[in-house]
Structure formats: C-alpha cells, structure tokens
Image (cartoon, rainbow, N blue to C red):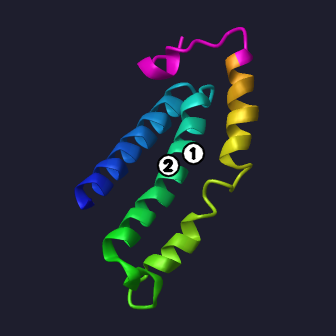
C-alpha cells in the first residue's frame, strides 16, 4: 500500500510540474491542466491520507499519530476555491465550449 501511495503522489507531482511548465510556456494562456491538477491532486490527497489511516489502523484516529489531523486538513482541498464540482462545471465546461479550444494542446505541451 505504501508503494501505491508513493506512486500516486509521484504521478500528481509530475502532473503538477507539467501544468506549471505549460502555464509558463503559454504566459498563463493555458488553464486546462491547472484545473485538472487542482481536481486530481486535491481528491488524491484525501485518498492517500485515507489509505494511510487504513494502513495504520485504529491508532490513526487517536493522538498517537498525526494522521487524523492531516485528514482534517486535506478534507477541505476538494471543496476549497469553488470546489471540484464547481471547477468541472464552470471553468472546464467554459473552456471546452471555446471555439479556439484544442484538446491536444495541453496533452502535447505545445502552445500555438
């Protein structure tokens, strides 16, 4: 389970770097990956902490480990800054409707 947790964290880290790199290359014109990373990483944080709690067991709920406090912190991430459902509904849907939207642009990392 620890390897799975680390793998997911590394995937989120790479995804974040890719989004930041493309944002820099496009001078802020590319928003898609940023929104996608916000959704993915915030939901992943809850899953990762939950899995860590499952791994530790019932002691994760007490004060013997910091995991319960960390869970309290990460639970706000999916609802912070408009919430992930709001990001999906408003920002990403608006982006998909734009006439100049190119679905391959964020994937390729190239801005035209």
Q: Residue at x 48, y 35 (%)?
A: 19
Q: Position of residue 47 (x, y in %)?
A: 46, 57
Q: Residue at x 49, y 78 (%)?
A: 68
**Main SS category, magenta section:** loop
> Could one spot residue 60 in this view of the protein?
yes
Q: Are marks 2 and 1 in contact (CB under 8 Å)?
A: yes
Regarding residue 109, the answer to whether it shows in the image is: no
How far across and how far down the image is residue 67, in percent?
43, 77
Classify residue 36 by image quadrant: top right
Q: Is residue 53 left or right of residue 71?
A: left
Dot 1, crowdedness within 10 Å: few (<14), some or many (≥20)?
A: many
The part of the chain drawn in magenta is: 97-112
Residue at position x 44%, y 65% from top? 50
Helix, strand or loop at label 2? It is helix
Instruction: Check disc 1 and report the residue beneath it.
Output: 38
Q: Is residue 67 magenta?
A: no
Classify 4 as above or below 36. Answer: below
**Front residue of this view, candidates 49 and 27:** 49
Q: Residue at x 55, y 65 (%)?
A: 74
Q: Which mark is residue 21?
A: none
Q: Is residue 101 magenta?
A: yes
């Amino acid at each position: 389970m620890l390897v799975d947790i680390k793998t997911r964290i590394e995937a989120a880290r790479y995804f974040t770097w890719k989004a930041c790199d493309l944002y820099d290359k496009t001078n802020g014109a590319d928003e898609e990956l940023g929104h996608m990373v916000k959704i993915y990483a915030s939901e992943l944080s809850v899953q990762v902490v939950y899995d860590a709690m499952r791994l530790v067991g019932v002691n994760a709920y007490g004060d013997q480990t910091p995991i319960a406090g960390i869970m309290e912190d990460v639970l706000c991430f999916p609802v912070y800054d408009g919430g992930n459902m709001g990001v999906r509904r408003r920002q990403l849907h608006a982006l998909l409707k734009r006439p100049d939207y190119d679905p391959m642009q964020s994937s390729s990392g190239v801005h035209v």
